[in-house]
Image (spheres, rainbow, N blue to C red):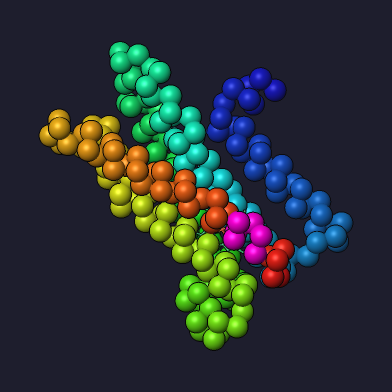
Amino acid sequence: MAALLTNLRTTVHVSLGLAILLLVVFVGLGWAQMDMRFWEGFARWTHVVSGIMWIGLLWYFNFVQIPNMPNIPDEQKPAIGKVIAPAALFWFRWGAAATVLTGLVVAHLNNYLFSALTLGAMTGFSVPYHIFIGIGMWMALIMAFNVWFVIWPNQKIALGIVEAEADAKPAAARTAMLFSRTNTLLSFPMLVTMAMAQTLFG
Ligand code: HEM
């Protein structure tokens, strides 16, 4: 058991194995069918898992790392800047990419991808469901854009991952922080649409 838990890769593989086992049991007992609904549910699972990876790390940066940086002695700051932050940023940006991709797949499988992306315009603004989830999808798309095209390039400068003038670093760090804060601001209303759309309108 200790060997299983001391190796992250093994732990994750066992976790995924348990997830598959759960589904195999329910399908095996005839309580669930491996039809289109199954794959839609599976797509939702991939979407929620990647969304948690992304937004979990967004909140880690905003609720834990940024507020506590001033409390860390200067000589210990490189542990965060050189080790923790780059590792967190890896899972953060790829989590964002996976969330967008899987979210678009879920919308497509729900048959409202374009209706939602046009905020219901394609259906004459007659389907509140599509307007509602479309607003959330656009919030999340803006957030993902911020991650890849503002936060990550500026963090690379701030953390010294790419060469830059020394005085460019504080400005880049501030830009990254403000856009990360913008994403935190958008995160709660975005999640209202994600989590409540089906219950309210489905
Ligand atoms: C561009 C990015 C995103 C797109 C295109 C997208 C798209 C969608 C769509 C179409 C649904 C189905 C809504 C429904 O009809 O019930 C959904 C559900 C959901 N999304 Fe997203 N989403 C995005 C980002 C996120 C993020 C960042 C999170 C963070 C965790 C998230 C979490 C969820 C959750 C929890 C659900 C509910 C799943 C369920 O009730 O089965 N989404 N998303």
> Disc count in the image?
0
Q: Nearer the viewer, residue 15 or 155?
A: 155
Magenta residue span: 192-197
The quarter of the picture showing ligand 1: bottom right
Say which quadrant the N terminus sits in. top right
Work out whether residue 17 can be spotted.
yes
When the figure is inspected, residue 180 is found, relative to residue 70, above or below; the finding is below
Whether residue 193 is in magenta: the answer is yes
Q: Image point 17% across, 36% down: which residue?
A: 168
Task: Please say whether residue 108 is visible from this viewpoint.
Answer: no
| Residue 55 position in % (x across, y down) | 51, 45
Lateral position of residue 195 relative to residue 100, left or right: right
The percent coordinates of residue 109 (x first, y second) are 60, 71
Residue at left offset 22%, top offset 38%: 171
Residue 195: x and y in percent read 64, 56
Rendered view: 137 above or below 154: below
Residue at image position (61%, 79%) is 127
Which residue is at a point 28% across and 36% down the rendered structure image? Answer: 173
Which residue is outermost to the bottom? 124
- Majority secondary structure of magenta residues: helix
Q: Is residue 9 left or right of residue 86?
A: right
Residue 61 drawn at (x, y percent): 44, 35
From this viewpoint, which residue is outermost toward the left? 165
Which is more toward the observer, 98 or 189? 189
Q: Quadrant of the C terminus?
A: bottom right
* Left or right relative to 188: residue 154: left
Q: Is residue 56 magenta?
A: no
